[in-house]
Amino acid sequence: MKQDRAVTLLGVLTIITALLAISVGRYIMGGVILLLAFGIFWNRGLGRFNDRSLYEKVIRTDIDIADLYRRLENMQTPLGRPWIAQHKGFDGDSIVFGPSAYKDCVVISRKKGDLDIKHLTLVDNIIRKEEDEYRFSSFVDPKETEVTPEHYAKFAGLKLASVVMIRHLAEMIEAMAAGREPEIPPELDVSEFYYHNSSEGFFRNSDGADVLEVKNSYHPFEARVLDTDGNEMASVMPRSFNGKGVVIDSAGYDMYADGKHFGDISRYKEGKREGFIADTDAGKFTVTIFPACMRANISCNYMVEMDGELKAVIGGSPNILFESAGYCENDLILSYDEDYLVLYAALEIFIMTLNKKFLK
C-alpha cells in the first residue's frame, strides 16, 4: 500500500542522509540520523516482524500448502471460503481468501522454509485460472461511489476483519507447526457489522437501519447508549475530574445499565498489552488496544475479549473529513457475539469520548 511504501522510502532517505553526514565527517549527526532510520524501519516491520506487522505473519514450518488447504477449504470467513491460485511474489500454489468488494485478500504462500500470511489489495499479483475470474468482477469503483461515512466504515471494517483473520490463521498454523491439532472451525471471524457516525448520532447495522442512539461529549462528559425511542440503556461515567474538567484515569469509571450500577472500568497494562478491564455483572471483559490500521485510516482500535474469546473489535476514526458530513467521528464495530451488543456500543462511545480530549 502507499502508506507502507512511503514509510519505507522515508527510511531509505534517512539512511542516505546519515551516510552523507558521515562522509563529510559529521559522525555524531550521522549516528543520530542512523538511529532515527533504525526506529523508522523497526516500526515498519524490521526486527520483531511477527509482533509488529498487522498485515503479514511469517511462520517457520514445513506444512505443505496442499495439506493446509485440505484442512481449511470448508471454513467460512469474512472474505469467503479459501481457494487455490498463485501469487507473483512466491513460488508454487497459494491459498487465497477473497477478494472482497474493496479488493481485500488474505493470501497464504510458501517461501522456502516459511509460510507467509499476508493481507493485500493488489489483486493483479494473484495469478488465477479463467474459471476463477468471476471472483474479480464485482469491485466497488471508487470513481463512481460517493465516500460517505457508511461506505467508509464498511471499507475500514474489512481491513480490520482481515487483520483479525491473519492473527487467528497464524495461531492455528503455529499450533499445527508445533504438532498439535487445533480445532478448525466451520466459521472463522464471521461477524455482524455496525457503525456510528457522530454527525447523525445513531448506531446502525450493515443495512443502514438504526439499532441504537448514542450521545457523547467531553465537556461536560457524556457517554450514553439509548434505544431508538430515546430510553437510556447504558452509560459510562468517570469517577473523578481535575479542576479543568479533565478526566482522572486512575480513579476509574462506573458503567450503568437501565439506570443501575452494572460494572467498573479501569485501565490496565500488562507487558505490551494495555487497554481497559470492564468488570461487569455480565462477566469480565478485557478491552485491549492494538496498533493503528493505516490502510483503513483508523487509529483507535480495540479487541474486546471475555475469558480469552474474542467478542468484538472496535475501530475508530476520531476526526475524519467527508464531503457530505464535514469533520466527524466515524467508528465501527465487528460483533462476534450479539448477546453483548449494547455493551460494545457503550465501550465504543466511552473510549471515543475519552479520545476527544486530544482533539483541538
Image (cartoon, rainbow, N blue to C red):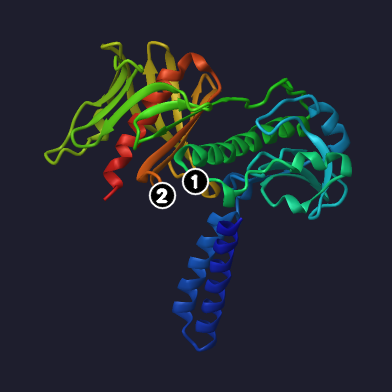
Q: Residue at x 84, y 46 (%)?
A: 128
Q: Count neighbours of disc 1 (C-alpha within 10 A) and say few if under 14, some if 14 to 19, many if 20 or more.
A: some
What is the quadrant of residue 237 in the picture? top left
**Disc 2: CA contacts within 10 A as few (<14), some (14-19) or many (>=20):** few
Question: Which quarter of the figure has residue 68?
Answer: top right
Q: In the image, residue 313 lies at what x, y percent?
A: 51, 30
**Residue found at x 79% / y 28%:** 72
Secondary-structure class at tag 1: loop
Residue 10 image position (x, y, % from top left): 53, 68
Q: Identify which residue is drawn at 61% across, 55% down.
A: 1
Q: Is residue 347 above or below residue 55?
A: above
Rendered view: 27 above or below 226: below
Above or below — where is 74 with respect to 44? Answer: above
Q: Going by the picture, which residue comes out furthest to the left? A: 243
The residue that mark 1 highlights is 147
Q: Which residue is mark 2?
A: 323
Relative to 213, is 21 on the left or the right?
right
Q: CA distance from mark 1 to mark 2?
A: 8 Å
Instruction: Please name the residue shown 69% across and 42% down the image.
Output: 105
Does 357 appear above or below 28?
Answer: above
**Residue 109: image location, x then y, percent:** 79, 45
Regarding residue 270, the answer to whether it shows in the image is: no
**Which residue is at the front of the view, 168 or 332?**
332
Name the image quarter holding residue 12: bottom right
333 displayed left or right of 216: right
**Residue contact at pointers 1 and 2, CB within 8 angstroms:** yes
Per the image, label 2 sits on a secondary structure element best described as: loop
Is residue 54 visible in the rendered image? The answer is yes
Q: Earlier in the sequence, mark 1 or mark 2?
A: 1
Give percent across and percent down for residue 51: 59, 44
Q: Amino acid at mark 2?
A: Glu
Judging depth in this view, the residue of 155 and 284 nearest the camera is 155
